[in-house]
Amino acid sequence: MIQYSYLIPLFPLLGFLINGLGWNKIPKSLAGVIGSTSILASFVISLAVFAEVLSPSFQGPFVQHYFDFIQSGTLYIPFAFQIDALSASFLLIITGIGFLIHVYSISYMHDDEGMVKYFAYLNLFVFSMLLLVMGANYIIMFIGWEGVGLCSYLLIGFWFKNHAYTDAAKKAFVMNRIGDLGFLVGMLLVLYHFHTLSYQELFDTIKTGTDQTTIYTAIAICFFIGAMGKSAQIPLYTWLPDAMAGPTPVSALIHAATMVTAGIYMIARSSVLYNLAPIALDLITWIGLATALLAASIAIKQNDIKKVLAYSTVSQLGFMFVAIGMGAYTTAVFHVITHAFFKALLFLGSGSVIHAMSGEQDIRFMGGLGKKMPITKITFLIGCLAIAGIPGFAGFFSKDEILAHAYAHQPLLFVALLIGALMTAFYMFRLYFLTFTGTFRGTEHQAHHLHESPKAMTLPLMVLALFSIIGGYIGLPKVISEKHWLHDFLSTAVTEKELHELSHTTEWLLMGVSVGLVLVMIALAYKATQKAQFAAAKGFGKILENKWYVDELYQAIILTPLHHLGIFLQKIIEKSGIDTFVNNVGTSIHWLSARVRLLQSGIVGSYIFVMVLGIILLLSIGFLSTIL
Amino acid sequence: MPIQYYIFLSLALFSIGVMGTMMRRNAIIIFMCIELMLNAVNLLMVAFSNYWENSNAQIFVFFIMVVAAAEVAVGLAIITLVYRKVNSVDINILNRLKN
């Protein structure tokens, strides 16, 4: 079955072509079915591939070579797919959650006139993401990398008639491209020093090669810049909250479960390289930590449902990068998997809420929705419990593993991350209480319209809620079970650093402390939201509500100078310089020809004179040239 | 006679011919000056033919004479036709070439 892995990206590609080319001929209901069945087919094949990777007879990564992509001189890049534990896990996540979101979108977007185009873009996105994780070398990954960036732009700016949305789409794409430059430079460095971009060859060369720490560090940092742009770390994270301008299922798929995890995948895939560049790993830890704390602090003061979830995503990505920075790649992938479940659940739940509130997204006008929307309320609560890290739910196991590794690495890191986790619990439950409990604060018209969402929307919610509960049991910590299944499974594809071991009592203590404090935060959130007074923010709260003024900072430091530089180039160099030069060339030729025209006077005498002069000149030149 | 005398004479005749071509107003006089230049060259050719004791130049003189004759025929025909139109052979009046 594994040799048919090429079918996995093929089905979404076909779905894209059919929906994309027939956008004005295919009826809307059919478009949704085409889009969803293609992903379902990919999911089924991914399951079969995963089962084969699981079986004991699977030997090492399976590389299938299709054709020679680039062959120029000594540069040889094949088009090949690599299936191993890491890519098989990501395949399941992408196709599985992608399928649920496609089904959800059929109902969510059913009265949108661009629905066929929407499903075409979604399928193209899944195709690109699959290319990204299945490629056997960095070039295929980069093709998928760029493809998901493109689809992110197309889908964020999906309602293109709104200027603010298209601006957000441009911002996302430009910031992505800045990261891509880092990725490209990294790839060029790899090509220059190691003459290959295939994972197998490169990692074999590195493992047996000489100690070239500076080169490894340079490549690692360049790749991380790419991850910064794609996975929204400081300083390239401001596009993600603005990306909430897109339809909610898009936010769920792209900006929660898949695209933003591409950076994690890339670094996990290059684990061999990163293990040899400790400075880069330290950098990743610090940036991840800063991002986690910054985003969590901003989320506390946000009033738009999707913005809270967006900053939550940035913060959780920060957690994942901290895990990577400590060398615990399988832990980061574990958190990717659990985060995909509960974040997609939360986003889809918020979409259900927005749908019921006739488009309202401000939680200050919500409240008490739990009575009319029980399924949404319960699944959303499960999502909140999972993200807060309550034992029994998926998020607990993965987040606790990150915290435990942090404590073993450096206790202060644990404290900082714990603060981030506590802020996470606070703002998520603030969101939950303000939205689903208390009294309704919206308009009469909205109150009439409140209803539970249709089956196509609630079924994915329930499936995701189920996985948010059971998804954590694939990675039980050492104190509970001897075998951490996910860690063992992924270690066949990813090389982890030697991590410090904690004693069992320390681990129980850490778990107890974090869970206890989380419960305290939930209680605090409950207290804070019962009064439901929304005074204007002042002081430190004002800074948080305005996102630490980072966007304004970028505007002042980067955008305005660039704007002025553009104006300068336009006015001075373009107008006065180049235009003047070109115009003067024309004018001078005009002037010259006016002078030369005077030679044609019609006076025969002058003609004879000039003729004689010319002959004398010719003869003398001829004579002189024979002498010299 | 030393060859220099012939060279000086030829040079003088040729210069007079050139100056005449440039300075005279009457078209027929200009033709006469052109003939003068050709004859100066003829003289030079014959002188050198005697000097090098080679008769090639004398044969060439015949060619030059034939060319001069043909050219004069054509030129005088043109002048005659133009005179019928403009009633003058003054080259300052013959400025139809302008524009």
Image (cartoon, coloured by chain):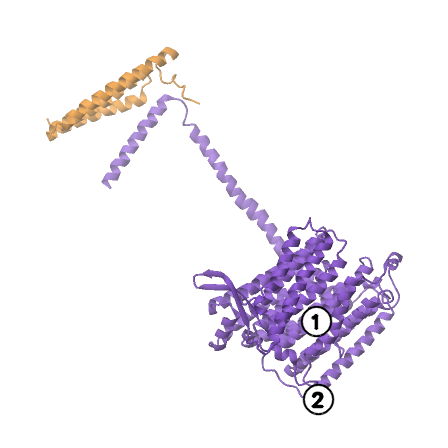
Chain colours: A purple, B orange
**Residue A302 visible, this orientation:** no
Classify mark 2: residues with Cα within 10 Å, few (<14), some (14-19) or many (20+). few
Task: Determine which of the numbered discs, if any, sits on residue A339 in the image.
Answer: 1
Picture layout, residue A54 above or below residue B19: below
The residue at 87%/69% (across/down) is A531
Q: Position of residue A240 (x, y in %)?
A: 69, 63
Name the element at disc 2: helix
Q: Quadrant of the N terminus of chain A?
A: bottom right
Among the two numbered marks 2 and 1 on one chain, the one whose residue lies closer to the N terminus: 1
Circle 2 sits on which residue?
A505
Left or right: A254 as drawn, with respect to B93: right
Left or right: B45 as drawn, with respect to A482: left
Left or right: B31 as drawn, with respect to A92: left
Circle 2 chain: A
- Tag 2: amino acid: Thr
Q: Position of residue A182 (x, y in %)?
A: 56, 64
2 and 1 marks on the same chain: yes
Name the element at disc 1: helix
Callout 2 touching callout 1 (CB < 8 Å): no
